[in-house]
Image: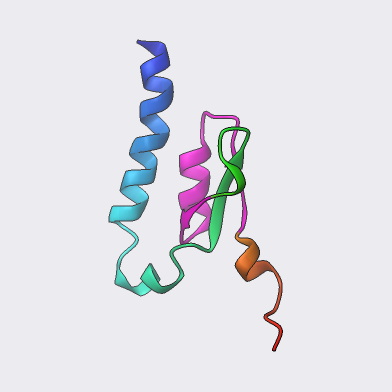
Amino acid sequence: MEVEMHRAVPMLATFLSVVFSGPAQAAEADRYCLRGRNWGFPGNCQFATRPQCLAAASGTNAYCGINPRYAAPRRR
């Protein structure tokens, strides 16, 4: 049961962050990425805010970082 809760909490946090992100944040819904051993690079980039990403990372070995698409200025 403990293993199932370990997986359910981050999934619930991810679901709630997507549901409550709202239309104002929809344009930049991929600004932060959940990263870690299970996510690869650049990771799960579906978070508009850092708190949303941190909520999904809570209780796991994952961490949050800026999506590489937004980290560097665009070149022309």
Tell me where residue 69 appears, x and y as whole percent. Answer: 61, 68
Q: At x 38% / y 30%, what residue is drawn?
A: 9
Q: At x 34% / y 61%, what residue is drawn?
A: 21
Q: At x 52% / y 38%, what residue is drawn?
A: 57
Q: At x 30% / y 66%, what residue is drawn?
A: 22
39 with respect to 1 (left or right)? right
Q: In the picture, residue 6 is in which quadrant?
A: top left
Tell me where residue 13 appears, x and y as whole percent. Answer: 38, 41
Farthest residue, direction top? 1
Front in this rendered view, residue 51 or 11:
11
Tell me where residue 59 appears, x and y as whole percent. Answer: 52, 29
Looking at the image, is 13 positioned above or below residue 9? Answer: below
Total count of labels: 0
Tell me where residue 18 appears, x and y as whole percent. Answer: 34, 54
Front in this rendered view, residue 61 or 45:
45
* Residue 56: in magenta span: yes
In magenta, the rendered stretch is: 44-66
User: Where is the C terminus found, in terms of image quarters?
Assistant: bottom right
Which scheme is used to colour this image of the protein?
rainbow
Front in this rendered view, residue 67 or 13:
67
User: Where is the N terminus found, in terms of image quarters?
Assistant: top left
